[in-house]
Image: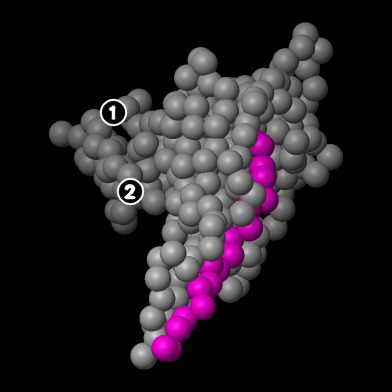
Amino acid sequence: MKKVIYLLALGVVAGCQPTLIAEFEDKPVVSCFLDAGTSPVLTISKLIAFRDDAVYSDENVNALSITITDITDETEITYPMQPAGSGGKYENPLFIIQAAHTYRLDFTYNRKPITATATVPDEPQNVAFSTTSVGIFNRSFVPGSSWNIEDLPEFDAQLEITWENEDRNFYMLECFTTSTEVVNENQTDAPQSFKADYTQNDYAILSSMQFRYYGDYEVSLVRIQPEYAVMSEGSANTYTSASIDDVKGNIDGGYGIFTGISRTTQTITVYAVEVEESTE
């Protein structure tokens, strides 16, 4: 009778739930997003089995020999990835990811080859942002005061982004700020970044109330590949399987994701909408 072991794949997609897999074999968990125009950062984690009798290899995730090869043209170019501190992190600042290029990941783990291939998509085309600033009407009532809805100044309460997508490719929105001026003073630990679910449409709408801080946000429309969409979809679920092959990912010989993305980014200013109160 096969043993069933709970495994936790660390560092792949935030929010992933434990995966139920028959039997345990020490395999690496890969997380690497090839973002066009930037240097790649790759993370290798160990798979964790919630059993005392699981047998691990002596592989050190901080001392692996890892390469990423540009295989777009006949003349392949190989880039070594260098360890960057602890935590299984690797990088190469001299290596810049290019859109429309295909890359192959290679390394050995537990005496077995680990490989994956990813194509970086072209950046989003014909992107339009409906505005560069959105307002949030968030006020406290003063006893004895009054105001009318007509007193509100005109402002954009939502952000609409449109783009070309005749082929129904996958896209998602990423929003990030370094501001510390919270919209709601009772939520001082509100996240400074958030993502919208992926879509195959050619538009997306963000309400101003989705932004938790006043100030500038970097709002990116990100084109993603199907393997990323599958992992994003899976991050909200618990997978059960009697076979390792059923676990979602695109790493041959391991777990996780090696994928290409490209983006268009616009700075959006979030500001408070104020109205004068009357005490008459």
| Spot occupied by residue 32 in the image (x, y as percentages of width and height) | 59, 39
Give the labeled residue for mark 1: 243
**CB of mark 2 within 8 Å of CB of mark 1?**
no
- Secondary structure beneath dot 1 equals loop
Please tell me which of labels 2 and 1 falls first in the chain.
2
From the viewer's side, name the closer residue of 117 and 275.
275
Q: Closer to the camera: disc 2 or disc 1?
A: 2
Q: Is residue 241 above or below residue 13?
A: above
Q: Residue furthest top?
A: 74
The answer to whether residue 277 is left or right of residue 70 is left
Residue at 71% across, 17% down: 71
**Which residue is painted at 33% across and 48% down in the image?**
17
Q: Is residue 4 above or below residue 228?
A: below
Q: Which residue is mark 2?
A: 17
Q: Position of residue 260 (x, y in %)?
A: 61, 30
Q: CA distance from mark 2 to mark 1?
A: 17 Å
Tell me the SS state at disc 2.
Answer: loop
Residue 172 image position (x, y, % from top left) = 50, 37
Query: The magenta stretch spans which residues?
Result: 263-280
24 displayed left or right of 260: left
Q: Amino acid at mark 2?
A: Gln
Note whether residue 210 is visible. Answer: yes
